[in-house]
Structure formats: structure tokens, C-alpha cells
Image: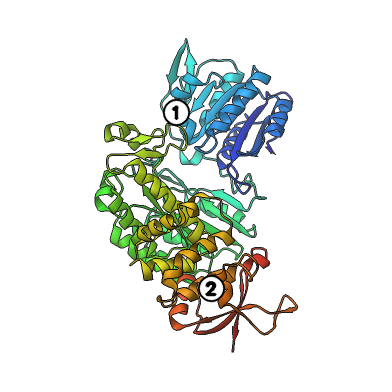
Amino acid sequence: MLPTSASENHPKVALVALHAGYSHSSLALQSIAAYADARGCGHRMQLFDALVNTNHQVLIERLVEYAPRIIGFSTYLWNISASIRLSRLLKQLLPEMQVVFGGPEAGARGVELLTRVSEIDYVIEGEGEAAFTDLMNRVFQTQGDFESVSGLVYRKDDQIQQNSVQLMPVSEIPPIVSEGRFDSAKPLVYWETSRGCPYQCSFCSSATERLRAFPVERVEADLQVLEQLSNKTVKLLDRSFHLGEKRTSTLLQRFAATPDGLRFHLELNPDRISEQAMSVFREALPGKFQFEIGLQTLNDQVLINIDRRMDVAKSLENIRCLVEMRRHPVHLDLIVGLPGETVELCTSSLDQTFRLYPDHLQLGILKLLPGTPLQQQAHQLGYRWDTEPPYEVLSNPSMAFKQIAQFKRYAELLERLYNSGLLKTTLTGLVSQCFSGSVSDCFDRLLDDSGQQIARDNLQPDALFDQLCNFMIPYLEDTPGLQEWLLWDYCQFSLVNGKTPQWIADRLTLSEKVVVQGSRRRLPVITLTDTGVTMINQLTGSRYVAGRYALWPRQHKKGKPVEIFSLA
């Protein structure tokens, strides 16, 4: 809970954020509080944080004790249901309290929420700093003149009124970081150097937001504060980091020059990465950047269907360069269920993207987010979807429900086997060597072999190895390198024990005693051929050579990197 300055003469305001994880914080609410403070309106304002998937009894008790006159909820797809439930409980306990919902989820559903949730008094669409402060002043002064509050949805004379949204001048957006108003205790620091987006992708909630870049001088002032932090990841909320080649290159060079303990998480448009930017990435310290790249699809016609501009060939070329550096983690996203994308087109995008060998590959089902152009066209386009969060598509004319369900299972297998790191080398080799690079063919066979258990049940890592090992028996003897990759993955996970699959246990020998953490231990030994080390080096950026290696696995190191010993 972050209080602003207090004065007993002012009515109290609570701002509530329900987060999806411990590392998260709310830049939006911090900015609202800063804006109100700067105008002398935030003297009795407090920020309350909680996790969305926990018991909220303690939060309710704190809010009731605080007894705010106004309570604001920052809502997103993942917390809207919990926010509605909380507002209903609190309204019973504090019936005079005014409830305000804002954020991308409520903002797009203002009229609907006021129609069906009587406990919500106001909804704000668009930026909240000025709008919430204006609303707060009118409620406290009992003026009742709400027509000029930007983006406000409210009730008047038994009718629901909806005001137009006015964008704030960049100069009025509070400099949260340079003023030290962010939560520096969290491992993630949220930051923005621009608002809006230069693109109009029809599935995206930012499709209608005009782009506004912050002055470089403001960005520099923020960086001077961020440089004082250690062991933090700065997650930029910019919808696209490419706002002109000169600005982008200047900022990237500045980010790269910050102290070692600071990392920057960026969303990139892959076809917009300049050679100057690529040069910065090559020269920066390993791990200085984390890249999130939303490819969504690799089909030109589907890109046209969603109003997305992207040079596919240039995108693949640039991503391949980023991945082959093996200096900064690369996360790629694909979407299943886009208009006009068939099963064949989707599997083609999946196979091409998998062959880039990114650090993380996420396969998501299209969400028809409220207020987006695609959601407004959805009935006309023949979509069926869940009308409650997360609004996932069920079917469309190009893809049946059963086919989308199969892609959900593919997504689960990617998470369990590849993104987890548990069987990444094995899966990569299996797909490339035994299934001609077809991820879907491999997954279909694996799902059939396990009765879908491998994607459905809550399997522990040992059980996943056992399932995959049994599936691979027909391929292991005749596929060069496959045995090595399976043993390599297992030895990074665990020592041989009673749960080790028999095929693996039979093929692992133990080393002579090696000194590990001050003790002499016998470790599992793997013999790697040229074929084996080629794949391992490609996925990790390492420079192993053929030979014998002993491994001290990560589960015995509490998450620290595995120790690998080259044996003579």
C-alpha cells in the first residue's frame, strides 16, 4: 500500500490494483495519484495492492477500516471479475462509497457494466489521470457537472451517458520514475517512453490510440533514476519501441550503457529493427535486453485481414539474427483463430516460427477483446466466442471448435516441453529429425500415443520424461543425436533416482568423483558426438565440442544454472 500525503480535512480515496503476480505493480494508479497530488487533490489517497487469485479478506478489512469516499479499480482482462465481486461486497459494507472502474477492460465495456452492475457508479474510458481527478473534484464538491470529464460513463436521469475521450498532452503525464513514485521493491519496474501505437491491428486494444512519444529529456531524467537500481528488469509498456530510427538507436545505446544489474524488456516489431539497433544488441552485455515479438501470423493475406503491416521475410531474417546471437532472450507470439487463417496456414506459421528456435514460443488463442475493431466485426465474420473474460474464440468459418481445441493442446505441449526448458533440446531434435520439421505432426502423434494425457494431466517433470521417453523408443536407435539430446536434457534436470525412466537409467554411467560445492560427488556422464553438440550449441550459444561431460543438475542447485564438467 503506497500512501500519498495525508490531511484529515480531505475525503479519502482508495485506488485498488489486483495483480496477476507478486512482481507486478500498477503504473496506472501510481500515475493517477501523482497527477492528483500535483493539483492538490490527492491528499487523502492510498493505493492498495493484492493478488487476484487469493483470499481478499485482508484487503476488504483494510479498505473498510480506511473507509474511502471514492474507490477506484484498475481493471484488466484477468481481474475484472474479481474487481466486480469486491465492489459488490464493499458497497454493502460502505453504501455511501462511490465505485469507479477504469483500465482497458472496463473502459471498453462502460455502458454494459453500468447496465448490469448496479454497484459501479462510474466507468472511465481512456487515460485516467485527468479524468479521475476531475471526477473526484466533482464528487467531493457535489457539483454534478460530469459532462466535461473525459471518457466518463455515468448515470443521469435513469439514462446512461457516455462522454468522448480526450487525450492528455504529453507534458501533463506525470513523470513517475524521475519523481521516485514507482514501487522500487518489486523486481519488475514498469516504465513508458510513449503512449499509443502507430499501428491499427484490428484484434488489439491499442488499435485506436494515437501515438505520442515522450521527450528524450524526460526519458533521460527517468534513466538517471533507474540507473540507481540494482537487479531489476525494466519492462517498457510502449506498444511499439520503433518511433523513428534516430530516436530508437539513441535510446537503445543509452539503455545498453546502464549498469550491469539493469535489464530492459522491449516489445519489438521485427521488420522495423534497423542495422544500428542490431549492432547495439550485438555489443550489449548478454542479458541486457529481453525481446517480446508478436508475429501473430506469417501469412500475408491474414495480415491484411487484421490490418497489420509486417514484412514477413524481413521479420524472419531479423528474428533469426537476434536468436543466433544467443545474447538476449527472444520471446515469440503466434495467435490461432485470426480471420481467414486455416489449420494449414496456422501450422505453417507454427513450423516456420519453431525453426527459428527462440527462447520462448507462445501459441495463444485469439481473444475478441471488447472495443477492438475485430470484436465489433465478429458476428459479421461468423465468430463464436466466450463472451466472458478472457473472450477466447471457440470457432470461426476457417477453423472448427475441435481444431482450435487441438491447437490449445499444442500450446500446452510447447509450455511443458519447450518453454519450460525441460525437454527443449529433445523436442527440437525430435521435430527436425523425425517429423521433417512439422511441430503439429509430432504433437498429433504424441497426443495420440499418450491418450492426450501429456497435455491434459498435471504431470510432474519425471512423468513428462517417462511419457516422452516411451513415445521416442521407435526413434531413438536410428536417429543420430536423439539419444544424446534426451540424456542431456534429463541430466540437467535430475540425478538418477527411483523415478528415472528405465531407458535413461540404463544408459547413464557415473563419473569418477568430481568436486561440487566443496564435496566430492559422482555425477552422471554423457558422451556427445559432433551431431549432439551441434544442436546443443545452436540452442544455447555454447561452444561444446564432442567428448564426455559430467552434469550437476539444476534441481539440486535451487534454480541456479547446471554445472557441466568436461572429462578427459
Q: Tell me the number on the disc at residue 507.
A: none
Q: Amino acid at mark 1?
A: Arg
Q: Position of residue 405 (x, y in %)?
A: 40, 45
Mark 2 surroundings: few (<14), some (14-19) or many (≥20) residues within 10 A:
many
Q: Residue at x 48, y 13 (%)?
A: 156
Label 1 SS: loop
Q: Nearer the viewer, residue 374 or 346?
A: 346
Residue depicted at 56% across the width and 27% down the height = 84
Nearest the eye: 460 or 119: 460
Q: Which mark is residue 109?
A: 1
Residue that lies at the very extreme toward the left in this rendered image: 301
Q: Would you say 445 lies left or right of 548 here?
A: left
Look at the image and tell me in which quarter the N terminus lies. top right
Does 71 appear above or below 210?
Answer: above
- Relative vertical location of residue 463 with respect to residue 196 in this rendering, above or below: below
* Residue 302 image position (x, y, % from top left): 27, 48
Q: Tag 1 or tag 2, which sits nearer the N-term?
A: 1
Quadrant that contains the C terminus = bottom right
Disc 2 is placed on an element classified as helix
Q: Which residue is mark 2?
A: 487
Question: Which mark is nearer the camera, 2 or 1?
Answer: 2
**In the rendered image, is residue 421 in sight?**
no
> In the image, residue 311 lies at what x, y percent?
29, 57
Task: Please provide percent x and percent y for residue 127.
Answer: 48, 35
Vertical relation: 300 (above or below) 514: above
Q: What is the C-alpha distance between the residues marked 2 and 1?
A: 52 Å
Amino acid type, label 2: Leu
* Total number of numbered discs in the rendering: 2
